[in-house]
Image (cartoon, rainbow, N blue to C red):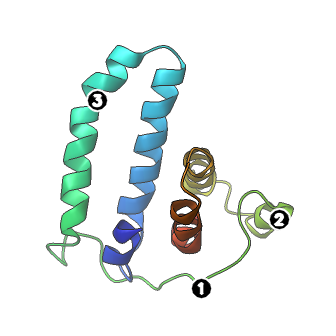
């Protein structure tokens, strides 16, 4: 959530990559490649440390972009996918919601899940 705030008005590439990176680590573990996931975790931690700094250089850290409007429509609803029709050639339209839903379903903290869902529209 803090990542989406730091990137507000600058695009959500950092947040989107955080989702897909985290999802990939979980998938590696699920597939039995725990040793590979453990090896990559140091790089993931480095990515998170960099993300926490927020944009440093306006010229290279994503230029200003309009914020998407908040929406209650989420990838677990049919309307989400019918509204996204036409965006399929952009892989983010599939991989970001896929990663987000997987990670959100693993949340064991209802407050964390609710807060995450409240800012998810920026990435989805």
Question: Could you say which disc has been placed on residue 69 in the image?
Answer: 1
Which residue is found at the position 61% from the left and 54% from the top?
97
Return the x and y of residue 118 as percentages of the image width and height: 57, 73
Q: Which of marks 3 and 2 is nearer the N terminus?
A: 3
Closer to the camera, 37 or 58?
37
Closer to the observer: label 3 or label 2? 3
Q: Name the residue under label 3.
A: 40
User: Which residue is painted at 33% across and 15% down in the image?
Assistant: 35
Quarter that holds the C terminus: bottom right
Q: How many C-alpha atoms fall within 10 Å of the one at disc 3: few (<14), some, or many (≥20)?
A: few
Calculate the distance from the C-alpha at mark 3 to the C-alpha at mark 2: 36 Å
Q: Position of residue 28 (x, y in %)?
A: 46, 24
- Marks 1 and 3, Cα distance to the nearest angstrom? 34 Å
Label placed on residue 83: none
Tag 2 secondary structure: helix
44 on left or right of 53? right
Which of disc 1 and disc 2 is earlier in sequence? 1
Of residues 56 and 6, the one drawn nearer to the viewer in this rendering? 6
Seen at 34% across and 74% down, the residue is 7
Question: In what element is the residue under mark 3?
Answer: helix
Question: Which residue is identified by label 2?
Answer: 82
Answer above or below: position of 104 versus 65: above
């Amino acid at each position: 959530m803090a990542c989406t705030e730091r990137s507000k008005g600058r695009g959500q590439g950092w947040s989107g990559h955080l989702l897909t990176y985290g999802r990939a680590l979980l998938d590696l573990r699920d597939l039995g490649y725990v040793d590979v996931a453990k090896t990559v975790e140091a790089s993931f931690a480095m990515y998170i440390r960099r993300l926490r700094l927020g944009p440093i250089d306006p010229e290279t850290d994503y230029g200003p972009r309009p914020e998407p409007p908040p929406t209650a429509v989420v990838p677990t609803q049919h309307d989400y996918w019918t509204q996204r029709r036409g965006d399929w050639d952009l892989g983010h339209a599939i991989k970001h919601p896929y990663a987000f839903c997987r990670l959100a379903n693993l949340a064991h903290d209802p407050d964390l899940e609710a807060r995450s869902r409240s800012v998810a529209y920026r990435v989805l």
